Amino acid sequence: MSLSLGIHTAGPFCGVALLDDDTLLAFREEKMRRGHDQFLPGLVQSVLDETGIVMGAIDRFSVCVGPGSFTGIRIGVAFARGLALANGTQTFGITSLEALVSKPPDRPVLALIPAKLRPPDQTFWAQRLQGTERSEPFELSANDLTDYVSSDISVVCTPDAVNTIRNFLPDPSLDVREITAKGVPCWANFIRPDDIRAPSPLYVRDPDAIPAKSPLL
Amino acid sequence: MATTAPIMEQAPDSAKIILGIETSCDETAAAVLRLENGVPEILGEVIASQFDDHKAYGGVVPEIAARAHADVCDSVVEETLKRAGVTVADIDAFAATSGPGLIGGVMVGMMTAKALAMSSGKPFIGVNHLEGHALSPRLSEPVEFPYLLLLVSGGHCQFIAVEGLGQYRRLGSTIDDAVGEAFDKTAKVLGLGFPGGPAVERRAKDGNPDAIKLPRPLLDRPGLDMSFAGLKTAVLREAQQMELTDQALCDIAASFQKTICEILTEKSRRAMQLVREEMNFAGEPGFVIAGGVGANQALRTSLTELASEEGFSFHAPPLKWCTDNGAMIAYAGAMRFISGQVSPLDLAARPRWPLDEASAETNPVFGGGKRGAKA
């Protein structure tokens, strides 16, 4: 028996899932655009209350580190790292794309979620996955989709990515799923200790800031 | 939503150990404080500054700040516990700044504290950053209530009558930029570097404070409100007419610093007279300067002289507790804790959270709109 708690606050929802090995013991998720900082502790508590499991008994924490809302990512990461500090528990970072695929896939998979949907710059966040072998997430232009998709690789994507993919790929076979917190904790049961992603935010863009210049110089 | 939920009153004389976390601007800071019989003692603290991350931008960039807090907050807490010689289990309550400030950073510190509190089954206390500053002189000396507070930092500039824990009356406030912001912007205009306070002060030492004449906004009007937004433009206009030698830069910095000192000193004189005449500040009441600009030596000297002229005792926290720090958050949290006030775990971070909420609501002098008044 191995208890794994997963947190996802990087999207328009706040979710927590608790697994015992492969079995989902409890899952809570609420749609929200903001307020993750308010609701996350209560959701974790309700998952513990529902199962009668105490925080100290959990073997692994995992948290979605992005791509996603920067503020949401930080809320989840700061909370997970606080839990890790208090409990001395191993803590994993999981990408949004890994959460979408939900566990290590037997066959090669290209996971896609929309990055920019408005023409002319249509892009996806993409990650190649097979077993526990994972590429780093990268930004993939819709124009380049054909280079990455073949009969050997299946595409897993979110519903809001489907239309764009269809415009660029003739007759694709798509495995369409929603991202939920349920996809976060499972990975922790498979990943080798030396292959752990740190629970650190995965920012996909640099901060928007312009260096200062004195108007006099 | 209520910001605090009552719990059973703590035995006030038993020692309590409180962790405080501060992440509302550009310092990731934490401290462990022991409070016994009302006497605070800092057992360990860490202040990790982000100056280098923001230097190139001439000011604090919110997204860069939030990222830096998220990178180091847990290790700052861990190192603080180590220096204090305690473990998470020894802590009686976990306090963190929950506003006002840059919300991305506030959330990082607050979520860290919530996770620690939840894991150890101890209370979480969301602290108003301004209350931390307001009480900070009491970290190093027993300043009695009531006292007059001049809070001057990069984000705030106000006069507050501090009558007790949670009893704050706003007497006056900036209506635009904070005074620390004026230092930063002036340093940016002159190309002196960041943070602006120390940069301007360094140059001012070698300059002629009467070299240029700058406006003193709102000084000709009664009351304690202040305005600093125009100074940056005035400095720029003067500087454009001069040959910018090293000496000229020093002269402008000195003139700017003198102007700030004169405004704050004159307004402080009026504030002292007001609290004495209208608020029953009797005997030799305390006058406290807190916040990062309180580190400016010229200002300290000027205000020390004023306090002695007006019969006030002058207090300023040591320099390390003038700028943002975890000790003041731990102390404000500890005071709340022993008076039975803790926060629910669903407390929301507040980008704006005036100390005197009643005045800010009925008579806002600064800020407004959806997010509410700043003061």
Image (tube, rainbow, N blue to C red):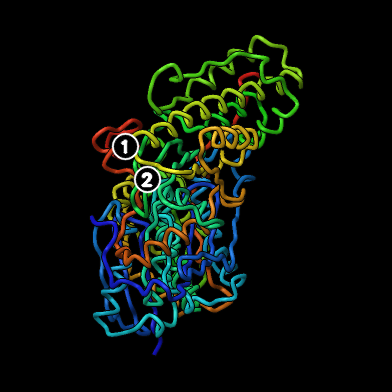
Q: Nearer the viewer, residue B257 or A76?
A: B257
Mark 1 or mark 2: which is in front? Answer: 1
Q: Residue at x 41, y 77 (%)?
A: B120
Q: Nearer the viewer, residue A186 or B281?
A: B281
Q: Residue furthest top?
A: B241
Which quadrant is home to the N terminus of chain B? bottom left
Mark 1 and mark 2: span between their CA atoms?
10 Å
Q: Position of residue B239 (x, y in %)?
A: 64, 15
Mark before the other along the chain sequence, 1 or 2 = 2
* Above or below, A94 relative to B212: below
Which quadrant is home to the C terminus of chain B? top left
Chain for numbered disc 2: B
Q: Is residue A97 visible?
A: no
* Above or below, B207 relative to A25: above
Chain for numbered disc 1: B
Number of residues whose C-alpha sits closer than 10 Å to that of mark 1, classed few (under 14), some (14–19) or many (20 or more): many
